[in-house]
């Protein structure tokens, strides 16, 4: 099973800071163990710079969002074709912040995923429940509905080209983290859905306040295949340590 550590920078860093962060990661990339896939997702203005800096390394570059239509009169939007022309290989879709602040639905996300896959980019699809849904015991139902809505229209081949990231929304930016048992429980549930759809090997990442001090227990879970990292991705040292931890856990498995 593939192991992936992906860093979502969100709306952080100016150009100088972004260049410094990418440069540090590139400088250390030769030390990163080769069996862990590394992806970074800077903001749109820094994607081309990131692609140029990481060319020839094992670091891949993702966008944080895209439009579902390949081109057209959509002022302010960024298309998959634009991303592909820069050398971007992955794109995050359905992140909880897109849902919360911009009203993004899984129907819209499904359209984006179709477009990404058609043009050869890898979607990193995010799903997960908010605190009220966790506390009311509805979390399995919520995640199942998200998966069926966003992934239901994909063929087995298309689904096999995706990455899924489970985000317990109540643990994003709050300092709270799902326990290893909670993470494994949900990842196993997602794995069962993917297996029913004929894609049991799709990587499932954990994305909720994952840091070097809790990553080992999370990454050691049977159905956790790495992390979609937020705050820790903004620090080259922490992000690199997470890659090393993912490698050690994989070797010990």
Image (tube, rainbow, N blue to C red):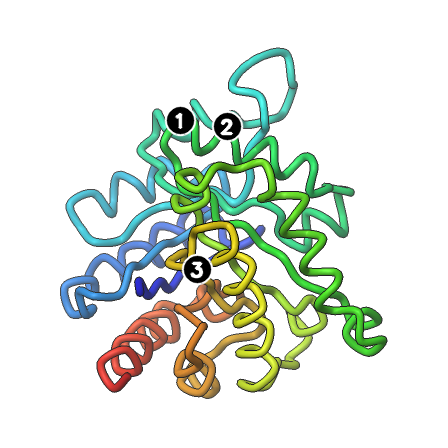
Front one among 2 and 45: 2
The residue to which callout 2 is attached is 115
Q: Residues within 10 Å of mark 2 (few under 14, many from 20)?
A: many
Is residue 72 depicted above or below 211 in this figure? Answer: above
* Relative to 65, 226 lies left or right: left
Q: Quadrant of the C terminus?
A: bottom left
* Relative to 165, 215 lies left or right: left
Is residue 122 depicted above or below 230 in this figure? Answer: above
Labels 1 & 2 near each other (Cβ < 8 A): yes
Secondary structure found at label 3: strand
Q: Residues within 10 Å of mark 1 (few under 14, many from 20)?
A: few
Give me the residue at 39% from left, 36% from top. Answer: 121
Give me the residue at 40% from left, 50% from top. Answer: 16
Q: Position of residue 30 (x, y in %)?
A: 14, 63
The CA span between labels 1 and 2 is: 6 Å
Nearer the N terminus, badge 3 or badge 2? 3
The residue to which callout 3 is attached is 7
Foreground: disc 3 or disc 2: 2
Q: Position of residue 179 (x, y in %)?
A: 59, 86
Secondary structure found at label 1: loop
The CA span between labels 3 and 2 is: 23 Å
* Relative to 195, 56 lies left or right: left
Secondary structure found at label 2: helix
Residue 45 is tagged as none
Front one among 19 and 132: 132
List the single residue furthest toward the top: 73
Residue 119 is tagged as 1
Q: Residues within 10 Å of mark 3 (few under 14, many from 20)?
A: many
Q: Position of residue 189 (x, y in %)?
A: 58, 69
Give me the residue at 58% from left, 54% from top. Answer: 126
């Amino acid at each position: 099973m593939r192991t992936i550590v992906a860093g979502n920078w969100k709306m952080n860093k100016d150009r100088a800071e972004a260049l410094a962060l990418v440069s540090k990661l590139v400088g250390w990339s030769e030390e990163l163990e080769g069996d862990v896939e590394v992806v970074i997702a800077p903001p749109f203005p820094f994607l081309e710079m990131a692609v140029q800096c990481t060319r020839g390394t094992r670091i891949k570059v993702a966008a944080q969002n895209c439009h579902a239509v390949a081109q057209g009169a959509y002022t302010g939007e960024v298309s998959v074709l634009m991303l592909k022309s820069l050398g971007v290989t992955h794109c995050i879709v359905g992140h909880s912040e897109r849902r919360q602040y911009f009203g993004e639905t899984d129907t819209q996300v499904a359209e984006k995923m179709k477009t990404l896959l058609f043009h050869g980019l890898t979607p990193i699809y995010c799903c997960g429940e908010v605190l009220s849904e966790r506390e009311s015991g509805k979390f399995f139902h919520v995640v199942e509905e998200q998966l069926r809505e966003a992934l239901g229209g994909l063929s087995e081949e298309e689904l096999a080209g995706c990455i899924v990231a489970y985000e317990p929304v109540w643990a994003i930016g709050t300092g709270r983290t799902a326990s290893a048992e909670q993470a494994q429980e949900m990842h196993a549930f997602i794995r069962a859905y993917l297996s029913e759809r004929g894609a049991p090997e799709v990587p499932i990442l954990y994305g909720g306040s994952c840091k070097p001090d809790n990553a080992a227990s999370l990454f050691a879970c049977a159905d956790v295949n790495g992390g979609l990292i937020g705050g820790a991705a903004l620090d080259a040292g922490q992000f690199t340590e997470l890659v090393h931890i993912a490698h050690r856990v994989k070797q010990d498995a």
